[in-house]
Each structure stands twice: as structure tokens, then as C-alpha cells.
Image: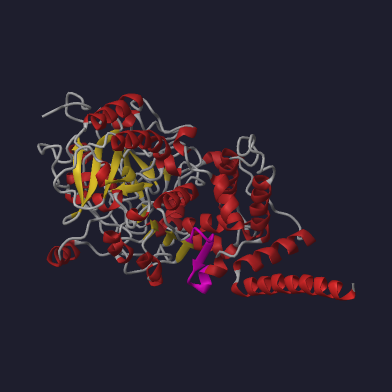
Amino acid sequence: MEKAGRGGDGAPRGPVLHIVVVGFHHKKGCQVEFSYPPLIPGDGHDSHTLPEEWKYLPFLALPDGAHNYQEDTVFFHLPPRNGNGATVYGISCYRQIEAKALKVRQADVTRETVQKSVCVLSKLPLYGLLQAKLQLITHAYFEEKDFSQISILKELYEHMNSSLGGTSLEGSQVYLGLSPRDLVLHFRHKVLILFKLILLEKKVLFYISPVNKLVGALMTVLSLFPGMIEHGLSDCSQYRPRKSMSEDAGLHESNPPADDFVSMSAPDISNANSGTVKKIMTGSHGGDAGIKTEEPLLQVEDDSTKGQEPSDTSQYLKPPSRPSPESSESDWETLDPSVLEDPTLKEREQVGSEQTDSFPKESMPSDSPPITVQPQANTGQMVLIPGLISGLEEDQYGMPLAIFTKGYLCLPYMALQQHHLLSDVTVRGFVAGATNILFRQQKHLSDAIVEVEEALIQIHDPELRKLLNPTTADLRFADYLVRHVTENRDDVFLDGTGWEGGDEWIRAQFAVYIHALLAATLQLDNEKILSDYGTTFVTAWKSTHNYRVWSSNKHPALAEINPNHPFQGQYSVSDMKLRFSHSVQNSERGKKIGNVMVTTSRNVVQTGKAVGKTCR
């Protein structure tokens, strides 16, 4: 067995796990034709066998309707193998070629065209960077016109791991190919609505074809959240592939109640090093009003079966200034978060230092503050830390927010075979992309459908539409973005290269917005401040999992942030124009009025021309 691309211990030595070729067989459908190293250790490179967790890989790499396009690019996410580790990031380049152009035509090639995808499965979310490299190799692979020539694929694996071996997730290369500027030009004021939809952890479905436009728009929206692409997606694909009905029945029976939470009591800290953990089950206190009762907030798994990421992973995921545990959130169990607002909290706390609180040694009752146990990075000792742990690499402001955790999925592209995930009770929400019209037709499975081509956001619930209706300050913020992006956009030399109105500038504006919003929630008597963000929106957001995780921890750096909305101010005539423009663009009635005005103007012009000719 070849050991190329692997260290002495057999673990991958770089960020790239596998290079995979997926082809379309006229009888068997989509299948893996080549993998290097083999997807299953011990199998050959040409094995079609797939790990159970990655059974959807062929359908993700070779998307629906691929035959309608000469080439396409797909970003997709796979769950970790054996439930251990983090999300596996997939980038696939698809192409098709006429069968008669092949130098070596294999026996199973019976159609006029041959369709194949070359995929990279990576531990790092370097979508655009990997795509750029992969497109070149895919082109060269097809130019060989002999798909048995696999040496170029092995060289690709070696080259990527050697060139990306020391790559960290900091800097502009993470955002290569993701353009917020194009997003704002296309969606205009609606970009902020998309941003808030995801903050509320709603079920959001993006729809467009081909796939490269779909995944580009979806991932660009996520890039507006500080730190999300770099460190916020490590737990975003924790789902179970569909099994037989009998297996599903057994799975549901073994699951604990949806409203149970797990914690570690204080006396068990002494036994922590020996692996002894006492689990206390507490009932629901209704702390998450934003989550339907039939959807479990937390799945309890046996910690003894959980493993850690390979030791070489940490060298790529360089944490910001204040790292949190290097594991998925499910490894860090907590008490019911609704007790965070317990009025007797201060009476129970005994402050030993500025960072560490000491608690009574007897077991804590269910209404006590949440406790988590976190190993220190250098010493390996255990300390008590109050609050919920996101399991993500966080900065001093608590970014990225723990949105894509605890069953809230991010699937840039969903294959039709994954359709069941939209109604899976273990999935509490999703941001997903689809090209198959069947996804769009079943509107009851999502809260909002984003028609990327028409820049249309269909929100089904009238209450949710009202909640997301932008405030005057929000409209000013969105208009500020649109005006800066549209200025000098026709300059072929300077377009998108300047700071103001450029991609990095737009991300910086959204960072200012979310930091100010978070700071505003910490203020006393903050009703007036929060009204600029939308009082009902903020109330709904405070019930989400990501906000409760963030608010349960202290972030001293936010004390220096101005909590006021970046565009607060007195109402003016220009605000009335903005409001009218937004209403016309986003409501059915407004669109009808706009169409009538256009039609009337056209008729007036035509009538004027006719009258002028008659008078001559």
C-alpha cells in the first residue's frame, strides 16, 4: 500500500485528505471511480466502496443537471468520519467530453458524452484557492483524453499538501472567489435581510442553476459574518445519512428526550483526569423559544467514543487571540442555558479570581448556573468556567457566533438524495443550496427561499416578514453599502480594487454592525438603542442558540465598542424616499404600483409622440 502524502503514523500530513474522481455510469449512475489515497484503507484506488458517512459523495460531486453544462464547480460539506473531528470541505470541478474524442475508450463508455468530476476533500475551508488549483488540473486531466492516466491526480495530491502544508486560516486567501461586492450589486438592500435571517437560525434555502452561482452566493453571504468561514463551520455538517426504516426506528428509540441537557457536576472534577464524568439530566426550562419542540436541541453521545482531530490539524487552524476548545461543541456539555438569568446567581457565586469562579462542592441543582469543564491548552489541568462553550475558535469579541452548531447545518449544495434532511427531526435548521426544482416546490420545509437569479427572498411566514422588516437605521446602512459599491463601478481598471466599496470594506462594515448590535444587548435601559436594530428582531434573536452561547460568556473587548447603530439619527425626507423605494422593491403591492408607473410613463411618451406627429 502506498504511503504517499502521509506521515509515518499513516495520518494525512497536509490539509488535503483525498483526491477523488466521480463518473457517471450508464447503468450504475454516479459512482467513485478513483480515490487517492483510497477512501477506505486497504482498498484499491479504483474501489467504488464508500464510507457510510460519505454515501452522498458521488451525488454531491456530480450535481443534478450537470449534463446541461460543459463545466461547473461545486462546494459541498461532508460529515466527519466515525463522528469524530470536524467538517470535511469538498470542492469538485465537473466537465464533460465527447466520447469520440477519447484516445482510449473503455468498454463501459456507451454514451456520446463522458461526464466526470475531480474532487478535493480538505480539512480547510479554502474554497476559492483549492478551486483555482483544481480547475487547472481538471482541464489537464481531460486534455489527456485517457482517464486511465492517474499520475497527474497523485501529483495534485502531493503538490497541494506540500504547498498548503503551512497555510493558516487568516488573510484574504480564505475569501478568494467570494465577492460581497457582487452580492451587494445583485441583492442590494436585501443583503441585510439575508444576514438577519441566518442570525435567527431560520431554515433558508438558496436556489439557482448552475451550481457555481449557487455556492458562490451562499458562501459569500456567510463570509459577511466575522470569522465564520475560517472557524465557524467545523460543526456544520453533523448529520446522519439515511438508513433503512428498521435502523431509523432503533436510532429514535435510543435517543434521549429532546429537552434533556448534560452537565458535569462539581464533585466530578477530581475524577476528570481518569475519564469519569457524571451526567445529570435536567428537564427543559423553555429556554429556547425559537426552536420547535419536536426538534431536539442537543443529541447526547457517549464521550468515550469521541476522538480528537489528528495532531497535525492544529498547525493549520491557528486560533485568534482567545481560543476555545479544539473540538466540536458536542464534546462540551452544559446545563440548561435558561438558568443564565437566574436572579440568585450572584448569591451562589464565589469569586476566586477575575477569570475563575469557585463553586460549592456538592452537586448543583438544576437551576444553578451552567458549568463546563475545559482543559487548559498547556497544562492539561481542568478548570471550571461558567457559560456555554461553542467549541469554535473565537476572537476577543466571541466571533464567530455559534450558528452552525447543534444540528444547524450549512450545506452549500444539497443533492436530491439528501432531501430528507430538510424534515429530519435532528436538524433544527439549515442554510442550504439546491438546483433541483423539487426543493423549491416544497415550501413548507423551509422558512425562506432565496431565488438567487431574481434576487428574490420569499419569506412564507407573515410574522417573520414583519420581524425582518428593516428599520430606518438599517435602510440607511444598506443604502450606504449600495451607494459605495455602485460608485465608479464601470471603471474597468479600478473596479473592486479600492478600499471603499471593495470586498474587504463590505466585510468590515458588517463586522462593525454585528459588534455594535452585540454591544447594544449588554447595555442597561437599552430599549431606545435596540429599536434601531428592530426590537422584535432582537427579542427573537435572543432566544436563538448562537446568542445564548455568546451571552453566557464574557467579552471584555466589547466594552470599547459603541453600542449605537452605526446609522442612528433623526428621521428625514431622504429616509421617506428610502422607505418608499424599499417598499416598492420588496412588496407585491409595491411591485404592481411600480409596473403601473412604468406602463403609464411609457404610454404618456408614446401618446406625446403621436400627438406631435399629428400636429405637424
Residue 157 within the segment the image draws in magenta:
no
> Residue 106: x percent and y percent?
16, 43
Q: Residue sitting at 29 percent across and 41 percent down?
A: 119
538 or 66, nearer to the observer: 66
186 to the left or right of 76: right
> Residue 365: x percent and y percent?
32, 57
Q: Residue sitting at 81 percent across and 70 percent down?
A: 609
> Residue 326: x percent and y percent?
33, 38
Q: Quadrant of the N terminus?
A: top left
Direction front: furthest residue: 616
146 or 543, nearer to the observer: 146
> Residue 560: x percent and y percent?
61, 39
The structure's colour scheme is secondary structure
Direction right: furthest residue: 616
The quadrant in which residue 289 appears is bottom left
235 or 282, nearer to the observer: 235
Q: Residue sitting at 66 percent across and 47 percent down?
A: 486
Q: Is residue 306 above or below residue 461?
A: above
Q: How many marks?
A: 0
Which residues lie in the magenta part? 451-464
Asked if one can make out residue 80 in the rendered structure from this viewpoint, the answer is no
Q: Quadrant of the C terminus?
A: bottom right
